[in-house]
């Protein structure tokens, strides 16, 4: 059922693995590739909170990629989904609330925007891991990007010095992206 639903997002959906929440939160390959273009100058990128690996599809085409998630099932699914595209990445099981991200030239951060029961989170203060971790990570890795809900209240982002991009696909607003340091273009 999920593979059929994923056909609009992924050209190789029939060979991929999904959870319902993972599919709903995953960016499709078109958006993933659009965003990944900014990561082209960086040799090593970490995909933090990789989930099922939707974002990894574009990133792994641009750089040596490390998948990071605290859930070993997500790591396995992301690696298998990359393999469906003939791509690969290193995998690290890390709880980012307890340990820093791996050494990388750039970080892609996709915090959870849903609660365990499946409902959506409407404030960045409740994202998991917390969005505020970016402030700590920037000292070591200035090139960071983060995916947010497209309905984010811009006032909640006033503590962040970054470019903010909204991405739509076929007329539907899909996501908000924060770009820090050398990833920012505006």
Image: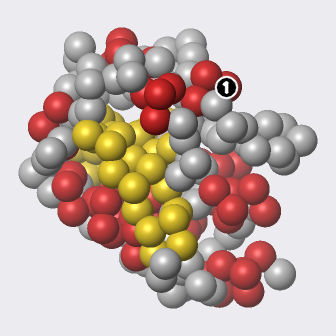
Q: Residue at x 47, y 28 (%)?
A: 155
Residue at image point 49% right, 56% down:
175
For mark 1, give the secondary structure. Answer: helix
State how the image is colored: secondary structure
Q: x, y (%) of residue 71?
A: 67, 39
Task: Name the foreground residue: 136 vs 75.
Answer: 136
* Quarter of the image where the N terminus is located: bottom right
Q: Quadrant of residue 62?
A: bottom left
Residue 30: % across, % down: 40, 76
Question: Which residue is denoted by mark 1 in the rendering?
Answer: 126
Q: x and y percent of residue 112 in the render?
A: 64, 39
Q: Residues within 10 Å of mark 1 (few under 14, many from 20)?
A: some
Query: Residue 183's quadrant in the figure?
Result: top left
Please tell me which residue lies in front, 181 or 165. 165
Q: Is residue 171 visible?
A: yes
Counting from the top left corner in percent of width and height, residue 128 is at 63, 29
Residue visible at 68% across and 64% down in the picture: 23
Compared to 32, does 21 lie above or below?
Answer: above
Q: Is residue 55 left or right of residue 97?
A: left
- Tell me if residue 57 comes above or below residue 85 in the rendering: above
Question: Image quarter for residue 58?
Answer: bottom left
Figure label count? 1
Q: Is residue 9 left or right of residue 90?
A: right
The answer to whether any part of residue 79 appears in the image is: no
Above or below residue 14? Residue 162 is above
Q: Nearer the viewer, residue 110 or 44?
A: 110
50 or 35: nearer the eye? 35
Residue drawn 38% across the image and 17% down it: 159
Quadrant in the picture for the C terminus: top left
């Amino acid at each position: 059922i999920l593979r059929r639903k994923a056909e609009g997002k992924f050209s190789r959906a029939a060979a991929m693995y999904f959870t319902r929440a993972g599919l709903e939160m995953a960016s499709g390959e078109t958006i993933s590739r659009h965003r990944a273009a900014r990561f082209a100058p960086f040799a090593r990128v970490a995909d933090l909170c990789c989930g099922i690996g939707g974002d990894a599809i574009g990133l792994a085409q641009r750089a040596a990629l490390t998948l990071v998630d605290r859930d070993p099932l997500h790591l396995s699914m992301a690696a298998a989904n990359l393999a469906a595209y003939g791509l690969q990445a290193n995998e690290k099981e890390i709880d980012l609330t307890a340990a820093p991200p791996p050494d990388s030239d750039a970080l892609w951060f996709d915090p959870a925007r849903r609660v365990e029961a499946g409902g959506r989170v409407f404030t960045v203060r409740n994202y998991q891991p917390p969005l505020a971790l970016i402030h700590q990570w920037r000292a070591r890795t200035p090139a960071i990007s983060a995916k947010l809900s497209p309905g984010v209240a811009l006032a909640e982002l006033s503590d962040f010095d970054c470019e903010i991009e909204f991405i739509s696909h076929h007329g539907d607003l899909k996501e908000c992206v924060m770009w820090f340091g050398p990833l920012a273009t505006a």
